[in-house]
Image (tube, rainbow, N blue to C red):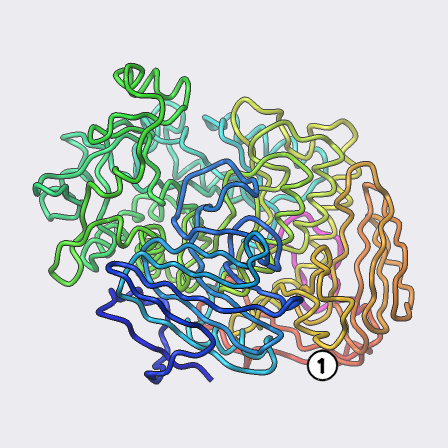
Amino acid sequence: MITKKIFGNPIATYAVTKNVPETRELKYFSLETTKGTLRFTCNLTPKELVYGLGETMGRVNKRGGRYISFNTDTADHTDSNPSLYASHNLLLFPDRGFGVFFDTPGKVTFEIDYKNSGMVLVLCETENLTLYQMENDNIYALNREFLAAIGAAYLPPLWAFGYGQSRFGYKCEADFLEVADRYQKAGIPLDYICMDIDYMDRYIDFTVHPQRFPDLKAFVDTMKARGIRLVPIVDAGIKVEPGNPVYEEGVKNNHFCRNKDGGLFQAGVWPGMTHFPDFLRPETRKWFGEQYRFYTERGIEGFWNDMNEPAIFYSEYTKGPRKLGFVLDILFPKARKAKKERDLIRDYQSFYHQVDGKSVCHYDVHNLYGANMTRASSEGLETLMNKRFLLFSRSSYIGAGRYGGIWTGDNSSTWEHLKLNLRHMASVNMCGFLYSGADTGGFMGNCSRELLLRWLAVSVFTPLMRNHSSMGTRNQEAYQFGDPEAFRSIISLRYRLLPYLYSEYMKAALGNDLFIKPLSYLFPKDEKVRHIEDQLMVGCSIMMTPIIEEGKVERTVYVPEFMTMVHYDGKDFTCTPCQPGEMTIHAELNEVVFFIRENRLVPIGKPITNSREVDFENLQLLGDGRRYALYADDGTSRECSLEKVIILEKNFSK
């Protein structure tokens, strides 16, 4: 049961698409109002869990933390940082069977048993808000009802479930060809390579560097013939440059945000001074989405949107630069004389959107910006392409999961961030972002061979499996660490699991389900699973149990019911029945161990090196179940329906 209580006159976020009945009753929380704010409080029992908040620091159980929903471009992924790139204002209380979604696009602070207060405090910097209240004794069913209310999740093509390679620093055709050649020589599967900002002409959106890529369409065709797609980045800001048709169209047709005096707001990002499209205007979303024709006409079928919090390096309004070293020296030499720390909040308070004909300060709708860029891109690509496309974004708000996926931003090559990757996957699925993943191996820092192998063994189970790293760090492509056999072994598992992963994702997206979920959703009466966050359910059959401690080849696993343990060594699957309880598993760096639930099956494909080789007909079925509901289609068609599910039986008859 979901109801909504409206406070004041909230701006429509379009997070919830379902018609939800309105109520005057405020449940579970107490409310204090002061001018300009709403303060909600709720007492907690000593041991109850609190889930939700999607992409934040901390654990899956949010008790003990302070979190701020205010989308921020930050590489500081530590518990002391309350804000990341997304705002997912959903709280779930599994022990009492209720949930709340604070639907407001402005800043919200959550303190959840912070400093052992024994309470939840939610402070909204607004008097205008829609509060969605949900009740169901089964928290899994409640979460699924919420997913149904915010709309069906984005459907990527089959190839988007393949392995992707990326690096800030690939500059020209030769760099991409080298990556493709070396993966092929190493016998490691690969489906796409991401193009970071160096492919552009001076970092300008919807351009390509004429010397580095003299014929992008021909190069795209060449790579696609090898089974490898190119996936370019698109940033939020449009360079201020007369003669640039996108800039001139944007100015002529009033598509850019303005300052308080009515002039066009500008700030410095990668290409220099830029204007920000007003993505809250439907006309601007349509215009911006049409710009992707530049890529689709060249055969490109996948994209990643970045810098859409929006990120700002430098502003004439506040003068203060971000510490970016060579970037500031090259792009904004004046900034070196400015103060050391900029006031980003003042930047966001300095420009305005048009919402339903009214001027609205960006600060008050800040958390919607990246989500509406994703919406603009997705709706444009829906018009430009007659098939599914890959699209994932850095910044997001609940509801944007209908239009694309997310990655969790500029993480680091540390074991703590590997653990954070696991926690994020459970939490962002709760908020409707099924197509998600982290930068495998870490974006910042120097990844070790051991860390990358263990991280790959986690990413094998996440929809987005992309190895991405920053310029100036150790090259961490899977062929960079000597003998590639161990990497070939781990990544080969991903491709053998594609029939299962694709099928489970499509069924979850079409059926308002989570793809990845905590054990407590399926075993709510088992006290031992309440605080297990390093084992997750993937689809309906698999429990992933990765080793995420440095120097370890064993770990303790809790098995909540009779299960089948599966050990994969790069060639063979060894299945062992296991009784409920704790047990120790062993996995060398080239091995993965996972479990299959009782009376369930997992379809396994033959060894392949590219998603175009997936064979949905000749499958091996692992597990002790009798039947498996396989979703199989051509991998690109938009006509997706659960009617396409076919039943496989253990004897392979349909």
Describe residue 454's horizontal placement relative to residue 503 as left or right. right
Q: Quadrant of residue 347?
A: top left
Describe residue 61's horizontal placement relative to residue 599 as left or right. left
Decide whether residue 616 is among the magenta residues.
yes
Q: Kindly identify the amino acid type of the residue bearing the numbered disc 1.
A: Lys
Determine if residue 497 is in view.
yes
Determine if residue 511 is in view.
no
Total numbered labels placed on residues in the image: 1
Decide whether residue 144 is among the magenta residues.
no
Q: Quadrant of the C terminus?
A: bottom right
Q: Quadrant of residue 417?
A: top right
Residue 533 placed where, x, y %?
Answer: 69, 57
Disc 1 is placed on an element classified as: loop
- Return the residue nearer the eye: 344 or 402: 344
- Return the residue nearer the eye: 466 or 276: 276
- Return the residue nearer the eye: 360 or 166: 360
Q: Please tell me whether the stretch drawn in magenta is mainly helix, strand or loop.
A: loop
Residue 377 placed where, x, y %?
Answer: 33, 53
- Return the residue nearer the eye: 419 or 489: 419
> Considering only vertical position in the picture, is 445 above or below 71?
above
Give the residue number, with chain letter if any, for mark 1. 654
Residue 428 placed where, x, y %?
Answer: 53, 59
> Considering only vertical position in the picture, is 292 above or below 204?
below
**Residue extent of the magenta highlight:** 604-621
Residue 218 placed where, x, y %?
Answer: 42, 37
Describe residue 114's horizontal placement relative to residue 335 as left or right. right
Describe residue 6's horizontal placement relative to residue 47 as left or right. left
> Considering only vertical position in the picture, is 234 above or below 542?
above
Specify few, some or many for label 1: CA neighbours under 10 Å numbering under 14, 14-19, or 20 or more.
few
Q: Quadrant of residue 475?
A: top right
